[in-house]
Amino acid sequence: MKKIFPYSALMLVLIMTSCTNGNSQDQTASLPATSQDQINAYNNLKAENEQLKKENTALQSDLRETLNLSLKIFSAMSTKNYKYLETAASGNVTIDRANDSIVFQYGGKETTTHFIDDINLENLEYRAMILTGENTLEIAFAQIASESSSEIYMLFIKDEVWKFNGFVTN
């Protein structure tokens, strides 16, 4: 019995090895050949993916820049920092120092809005970035109060850098 065990173990190893060696051929031979159309489609998708990554990075940068600019404008309105507001404003915006208001074009007509001077960052929520054109966007905020809330849309236009183009509220 002791002599049979080594021989049977050797036979088992030989059988297993021969089965494995017979199947170890290049397994890609069993896969269908990739057509040129599939290769082109893959390359197109890869190029499109790279383009979308670049666009996403640009949008993230635009959001960061306009969000920071919005917060600085809120601060400038509450402290009546006219100089900063004039620097941050586009050519379409006039800062009316006498009335603490901003005059700008909105919806095809001249609009005047008074400074928002009661912004409390603890009650301010970012809601959305809305692309309104190739070089224009809005940053939407909500100012939450105990019994109500109001929305604030900060308008921006890009001319080399993002500039404040006015704001509207509900």
Image (cartoon, helix red, strand yellow):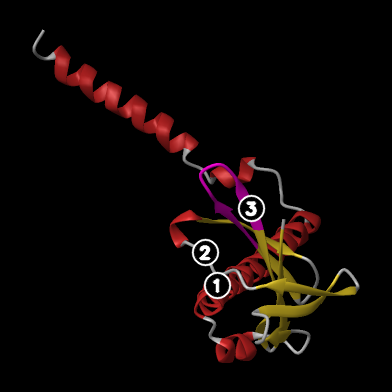
Q: Residue furthest top?
A: 1
**Residue 102 in which image quadrant:** bottom right
Image quarter in which the C terminus is found: bottom right
Residue 167 in the magenta stretch? The answer is: no
Dot 2 corresponds to which residue? Answer: 119
Dot 1 lies on which element? helix
Q: Residues within 10 Å of mark 1 (few under 14, many from 20)?
A: many
Please provide the residue range marked out in magenta.
140-151
Asked whether the beta carbons under mark 2 and mark 1 sit within 8 Å of each other, the answer is: yes
Q: Residues within 10 Å of mark 3 (few under 14, many from 20)?
A: few
Dot 1 corresponds to which residue? Answer: 74
Image quarter in which the N terminus is found: top left
Q: Mark 1 or mark 3: which comes first in sequence?
A: 1
- Which sits in the foreground, 87 or 47? 87
Dot 3 corresponds to which residue? Answer: 150
Q: Residue furthest left?
A: 2
